[in-house]
Image (cartoon, helix red, strand yellow):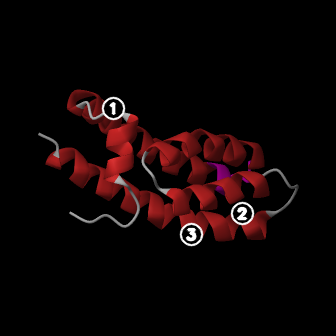
Amino acid sequence: MNYSLINTQSISDNMYGNTELLKQFVALYLEQTPIDIADIKHAFEIQDQHAIKTTAHHIKPTLKYIGAEHLFQIIDELEIAAQKPNNWETISTLINRALPQLQLMTDELQNFYFSLK
């Protein structure tokens, strides 16, 4: 199956081709990503730039591990934007770009998880 965000070879390489480790890793991110999405949404709703920055920083290693380079760049920009006071227009734009891609990443990870034997 072709994926637009995740790189299954990168994921496999990072887990040394160990299928059980792959399953654990992907399951962990399937559990954590919806929490991260909710945290970003909530932080934006209450205009908590520090929480946005912290959550973005927390998400970035996952994106590297799964080879989601384009999404990594958006989340990195979000982390940087959240460090600038009252930068809500840029933050809003980046969140609106990131959230659908985070959902797509979750869908792709779920499909990948079910393809593992």
Q: Is residue 30 visible?
A: no
The mark that comes first in sequence, 3 or 1, is 1
Mark 3: which amino acid? Answer: Arg
CB under 8 Å between discs 3 and 1: no
Which residue is pictured at 68% across the width and 48% down the height? 52
Q: Is residue 84 left or right of residue 11?
A: right
Residue where numbered disc 2 is placed: 91
Label 1: few (<14), some (14–19) or many (≥20) C-alpha neighbours in 10 Å:
few
Residue 113: x, y in percent? 23, 45
Q: Is residue 19 left or right of residue 41?
A: left
Q: Is residue 63 left or right of residue 116?
A: right
Residue where numbered disc 3 is placed: 97
The magenta stretch is 43-48
Task: For marks 1 and 2, give the one nearer the viewer.
Answer: 1
Task: For marks 3 and 1, give the one nearer the viewer.
Answer: 1
Which residue is pictured at 61% across the width and 63% down the height? 95
Q: Is residue 65 visible?
A: yes
Query: For the C terminus, which image quadrant?
Result: top left
The mark that comes first in sequence, 2 or 3, is 2
Residue 39, which numbered label?
none
Q: Nearer the viewer, residue 42 or 29?
A: 29
Mark 2: which amino acid? Answer: Ile
97 vs 22: above or below: below
Residue 84 sits inside the magenta stretch: no
- What secondary structure is found at the residue carrying circle 2? helix
Label 2: few (<14), some (14–19) or many (≥20) C-alpha neighbours in 10 Å:
many
Residue where numbered disc 1 is placed: 16
CB under 8 Å between discs 1 and 2: no
